[in-house]
Amino acid sequence: MLRFIILSISILTMVSNYMIFNSYRHQTILLNDAKNDMFTLSSSQLKNIYYKYPSLALNSVPILTYISRYYSEENNFNDAIDQLKQSLVFNPNSLYTKYLLSRNYIFLNDFKSAEIYLEEIFHESPKIESSTSLYFFILGEKKNISKLIEYRNMLADIDNYKIWSFYIAAIKKNILDNDDAIFYDSLVADFENKF
């Protein structure tokens, strides 16, 4: 009986170590691909990745989030969205997952869904250039001048030329009346003073 228990524990340990090794190996490739905007794995290699194993990456982004990039690259946006939603089950706080979700919704012209995720990211980390710029672009496209004006005070703490540029462009695109024009002019003056 004792031999059976020791043998069982040994087998479980070996399987666990193998899964850890594979998870680490795949994550290294996927992280490098994301960092360099590359897609080095084949479809068959992607299908062999066991994504339910916990992410060992320091950023705690689920493996499935990185896999979803490949589906987006192939214009398979609905599958990418499904994977990203499943990733949020593994880590509901992953800003990168939410950002990729918003981009896939934009590719499908679903600006309403994209706005939901971009707004979450903005309120959590407004200084992230990619998501905040995209959020302001979406607000501009949806003609949401009131929400854009509401964010003016938050923008004062952001020293990022690109974010400000997207913000100003979104406001300019949606000037409705003289009050909006005055707001826009003061915004441009602040922009010129800041940069």
Image: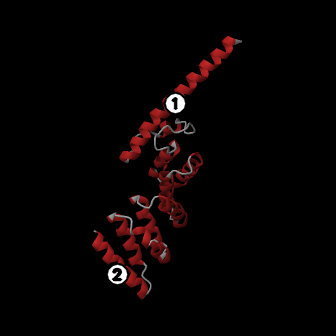
Residue 11 occupies quadrant: top right
Is disc 2 placed on a helix, strand or loop? Answer: helix
Give the percent coordinates (x, y) of residue 62.
52, 44
* Mark 2 vs mark 1, CA separation in Å: 57 Å
Q: Name which residue lies at 44% across and 41% down.
A: 30
State the colouring used for the structure image.
secondary structure
Q: Which mark is residue 20?
A: 1
N-term mark: 2 or 1:
1
Task: Reply above or below: 126 against 56.
Answer: below
Secondary structure beneath label 1: helix
Residue at left offset 38%, top offset 46%? 35
Rendering quarter of residue 190 = bottom left
Q: Nearer the viewer, residue 180 or 78?
A: 180
Which of the pair 80/172 is nearer the observer?
172
Residue annotated with mark 2? 185
Say which residue appears at 41% left-offset and 46% top-offset.
34
- Where, quadrant-wise, is the C terminus in this rendering? bottom left
Q: Residues within 10 Å of mark 2 (few under 14, many from 20)?
A: some
Instruction: Tell me if residue 5 can be seen.
Output: yes
Identify residue type, mark 2.
Asp
Q: Residue furthest right?
A: 1
Q: Amino acid at mark 1?
A: Ile
Residues packed near mark 1 inside 10 Å, few (<14), some (14 to 19) or many (20 plus): some
Q: Is residue 113 left or right of residue 153?
A: right
